[in-house]
Image (cartoon, rainbow, N blue to C red):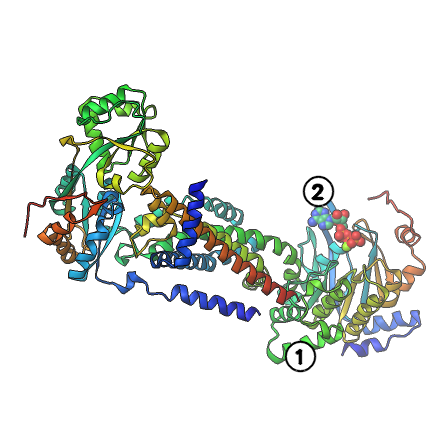
């Protein structure tokens, strides 16, 4: 259903912006002056972003800049100090979170077999009987882990765990998937496999929000880019625009590998 | 030293001859203790898991209480249970005083806080690991507790063993509520106390060796089970 | 593998828990609150089977100090009281906890001491003189200190000797607050004198050269009594069976059984029931 909306995309940037505005996919998630304080410090500072259905938003920025915190806030895992997160125009509630899934920077695997990890997530999300079995099998296939279904999830390699985590998140049929540096410690082959999972999910209509330090990955996977610095969003735009011609000093410095110290923060 | 060796010899003799009185006492000891540990696990595991995994008002107070109850003196427990089960006590009409059931009740009270407090610690550590994933999946409190208990099951066997150790070695509570009645409520520890008070120190020590052997066997059995199960699980 | 281990555990569990539980198998039983001296000496092992054979009633003995036995019985936790402290027993009946009291048997107390006999009391037959001598010497004395029949009898003798043991407690007079056996073990560890009933002493296994130092004083007389706990006051008392036991103990059958019990070839309890039904 969403696919059709995105099949009208064109490689010509200018034209595409026009089309998008015309099609104007639903805003799934938006933040209003979102702030988060901890330890007497403002770690997330007045963030306003919109995430539209079917888009792939990349979140980039230096270490400790607040990417993971932002994802947690968007997913409703931590309550904002100020401001709010709106899911389809309304405050995020239980039903909202049910339509979301997250893959953490360090994937959390239950002390069970790979398939039992999938089963647990599916059971919690209310899938039963043959539907659950079907989804388990699908997820294992997608993650290319059929042969390792009975293996303890914690003894899987980092790449296998990451694939399982993504497959587990997707098995619950979320509308939006948050991923926090899902390929940070993976080799190119595993990275490719995880990216492929993300691409397939997107093709199935899942909205993607992904934090990454990998410029190539952002180019490969992303539509939009949110660039953060010191808890603030300093630049947003289409991935290629921001990466090719950053407007903010923070993004420019980061891309050049310079340390950027913002005098205003 | 020589009397210690004599005790060892006596212990071996008692075991190999399969003295029927001794077997009866060992059987009752195991029955009372294992039942009490099982009951303590049924009560203590969920309590420990709830306190360890869920956030609710008074949670840290509950943790403090559990930890303090671990130090409950057996004699005090014996006294409480005695007063409850005594003919004039609130549970007197049940007629449970001086029965194995009374001993099981006393030991359950003694062991439950240990099981609960150790479970709380283990579950809390595991939950620290799982919490975000649980929150992301919106796992409800009941499912959380069940999942944590299940995933911690191998560590929790050690908790049950700690409870077993306390219960099987305990004498103060069971002698008070059981009465150490021959063939009815006489267990290993009360027999050891009895033989000591009769001045039969060698016999008492021999029984102590037997008790230790049983504890070793039970611990060995559980640890073997744990290792086997873990090997199968993590293969 | 796991399944087989589980099966093994299940079998073990059945073996342990499936065994007949005598507390439920025998419904016809009474509880007798008694003292360590009667139980630990082996007397009950000797006479109770005779009674059970005859009546089918199982007698379950809770052996504690006389003081505690009386308290337990006063709580209604027992059908018969079989102890040795006549004053306390009479009080128990006077308070309505017991139906009536009857003499059953007696034995005697003795004072035992270390082979070196530091107070020089060996061979004495006057308990009061011997105790005074112990008090005047540097020797230690270990007392039950637990309100038991033996403890009370010991305190009576100290009073007659004019020794204030309360003041001496902690110095040469040591109160163990424990049963007879534990007190003897302590006395032997300390090299202290102690007072004990003869039956317990003969059956005591940890003597370490300790000997009977003082015996034969009429004041060492140790009377045992039996009381049926009052069913009017404590409705759960099994009065019929309890009475059967009391009657049997006082009958010539019971008295003969008591007299026939010997330790090391010597009679240790001397039946003296006045009421012979
Ligand atoms: N609960 C907390 N209490 C205090 N400080 C916190 C808390 N959580 C995060 N922080 C701080 O907030 C800042 C942002 O953390 P966050 O994990 O969001 O960074 P990040 O952008 O994801 O970095 P990285 O690229 O290294 O993953 C860090 O300085 C971190 O130390
Ligand atoms: Mg991060």
Is disc 2 surrounded by few (<14), some (14 to 19) or many (20+) residues within 10 Å? few
Disc 2 vs disc 1: which is toward the camera?
A: 1
Q: Tell me the chain of label 2.
A: A
| Mark drawn on residue C108 | none
**Residue C75 in the image, given as x and y percentages of width and height:** 23, 47
CB under 8 Å between discs 2 and 1: no
**Foreground of the two, A124 or B168:** B168
Residue under pointer 2: A40
**Foreground of the two, A20 or B16:** B16
**Residue A46 in the image, given as x and y percentages of width and height:** 76, 52
Q: Earlier in the sequence, mark 2 or mark 1?
A: 2
Q: Residue at x 21, y 45 (%)?
A: C265
Quadrant into which the C terminus of chain B falls = bottom right
Left or right: residue B88 compared with residue A214: left
Left or right: residue B44 compared with residue B174: right
For residue A59, say whether it is visible.
Answer: yes
Q: Residue furthest top?
A: C136
Marks counted in the figure total 2
Q: Quadrant of residue A219?
A: bottom right
**Residue C188 in the image, given as x and y percentages of width and height:** 34, 33
Residue under pointer 1: A134
For residue B139, say whether it is visible.
Answer: no
**Residue C53 in the image, given as x and y percentages of width and height:** 18, 61
Q: Tell me if residue C77 comes above or below residue C223 in the rendering.
A: below
Report if the beta carbon of the residue with label 1 is closer than 8 angstroms to ligand 2: no
Q: Residue at x 34, y 29 (%)?
A: C191
Q: Tell me if residue A214 comes above or below residue B5 in the rendering.
A: below
Q: Tell me the chain of label 1.
A: A
**Foreground of the two, B21 or B164:** B21
Element on which disc 1 rests: helix
Report if the beta carbon of the residue with label 2 is closer than 8 angstroms to ligand 1: no
Element on which disc 2 rests: loop
């Amino acid at each position: 259903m969403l696919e059709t909306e995105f099949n009208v995309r064109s490689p010509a940037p200018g034209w595409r912006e026009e089309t998008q505005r015309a099609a104007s996919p639903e805003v799934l998630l938006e933040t209003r002056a979102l702030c988060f304080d901890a330890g007497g410090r403002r770690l997330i500072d007045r963030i306003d972003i919109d995430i539209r259905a079917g888009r792939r938003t990349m979140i980039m920025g230096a270490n400790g800049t607040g990417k993971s915190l932002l994802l947690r806030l968007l997913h409703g895992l931590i309550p904002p100090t100020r401001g709010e997160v709106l899911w389809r125009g309304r405050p995020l509630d239980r039903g909202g979170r049910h339509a979301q899934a997250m893959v953490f920077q360090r994937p959390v695997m239950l002390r069970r077999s790979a398939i039992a990890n999938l089963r647990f997530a599916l059971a919690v999300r209310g899938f039963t009987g043959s539907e659950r079995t079907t989804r388990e099998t699908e997820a294992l296939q997608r993650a290319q882990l059929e042969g390792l279904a009975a293996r303890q999830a914690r003894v899987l390699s980092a790449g296998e765990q990451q694939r399982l985590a993504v497959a587990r998140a997707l098995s619950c049929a979320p509308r939006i998937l948050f991923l926090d540096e899902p390929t940070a410690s993976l080799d190119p082959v595993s990275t490719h496999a995880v990216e492929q999972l993300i691409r397939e999910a997107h093709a199935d209509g899942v909205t993607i929000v992904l934090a990454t330090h990998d410029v190539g990955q952002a180019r490969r996977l992303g539509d939009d880019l949110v660039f953060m610095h010191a808890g603030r969003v300093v630049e947003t735009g289409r991935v290629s625009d921001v990466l090719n011609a950053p407007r903010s000093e923070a993004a420019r410095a980061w891309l050049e590998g310079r340390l950027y110290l913002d005098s205003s923060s | 030293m020589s009397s210690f060796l004599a005790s060892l010899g006596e212990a071996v003799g008692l075991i190999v001859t399969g003295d029927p009185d001794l077997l009866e006492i060992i059987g009752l000891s195991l029955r009372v203790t294992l039942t009490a540990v099982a009951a303590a696990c049924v009560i203590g595991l969920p309590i420990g898991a709830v306190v360890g995994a869920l956030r609710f008002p008074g949670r840290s107070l509950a943790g403090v209480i559990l930890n303090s109850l671990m130090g409950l003196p057996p004699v005090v427990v014996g006294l409480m249970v005695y007063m409850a089960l005594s003919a004039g006590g609130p549970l007197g009409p049940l007629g449970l005083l001086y029965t194995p059931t009374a001993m099981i009740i006393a030991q359950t009270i003694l062991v439950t806080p240990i099981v609960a407090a150790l479970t709380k610690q283990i579950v809390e550590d595991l939950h620290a690991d799982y919490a975000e994933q649980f929150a992301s999946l919106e796992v409800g409190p009941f499912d959380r507790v069940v999942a944590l208990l299940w995933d911690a099951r191998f560590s929790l066997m050690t908790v049950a063993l700690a409870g077993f150790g306390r219960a099987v070695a305990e004498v103060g509570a069971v002698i008070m509520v059981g009465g150490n009645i021959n063939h009815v409520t006489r267990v290993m520890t009360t027999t050891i106390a009895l033989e000591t008070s009769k001045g039969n120190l060698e016999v008492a020590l021999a029984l102590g060796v037997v008790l230790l052997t049983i504890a070793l066997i039970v611990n060995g059995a559980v640890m073997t089970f744990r290792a086997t199960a873990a090997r199968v699980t993590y293969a | 593998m796991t399944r087989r281990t589980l099966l093994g555990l299940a079998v073990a569990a059945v073996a342990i828990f499936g065994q007949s539980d005598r507390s439920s198998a025998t419904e016809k039983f009474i509880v007798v609150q008694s003292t360590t001296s009667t139980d630990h000496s082996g007397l009950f092992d000797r006479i109770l089977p005779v009674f059970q054979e005859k009546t089918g009633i199982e007698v379950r003995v809770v052996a504690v100090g006389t003081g505690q036995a009386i308290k337990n019985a006063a709580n209604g936790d027992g059908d018969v009281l079989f102890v040795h402290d006549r004053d306390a027993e009479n009080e128990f009946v006077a308070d309505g906890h017991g139906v009536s009291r009857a003499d059953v048997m007696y034995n005697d107390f003795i004072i035992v001491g270390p082979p070196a006999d530091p107070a020089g009391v060996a061979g004495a037959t006057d308990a009061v003189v011997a105790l005074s001598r112990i008090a005047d010497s540097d020797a230690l004395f270990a007392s039950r200190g637990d309100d038991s029949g033996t403890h009370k009898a010991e305190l009576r003798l100290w009073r007659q000797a004019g020794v204030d043991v309360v003041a001496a407690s902690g110095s040469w007079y040591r109160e163990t607050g424990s049963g007879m056996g534990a007190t003897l073990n302590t006395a032997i560890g300390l090299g202290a004198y102690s007072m004990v009933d003869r039956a317990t002493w003969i059956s005591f296994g940890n003597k370490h050269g300790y000997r009977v130092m003082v015996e034969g004083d009429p004041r060492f007389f140790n009377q045992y009594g039996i009381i049926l706990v009052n069913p009017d006051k404590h409705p759960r008392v099994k009065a019929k069976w309890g009475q059967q036991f009391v009657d049997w103990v006082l009958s010539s059958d019971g008295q003969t059984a008591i007299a026939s019990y010997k330790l090391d070839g010597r009679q240790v309890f001397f039946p003296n029931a006045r009421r012979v039904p």
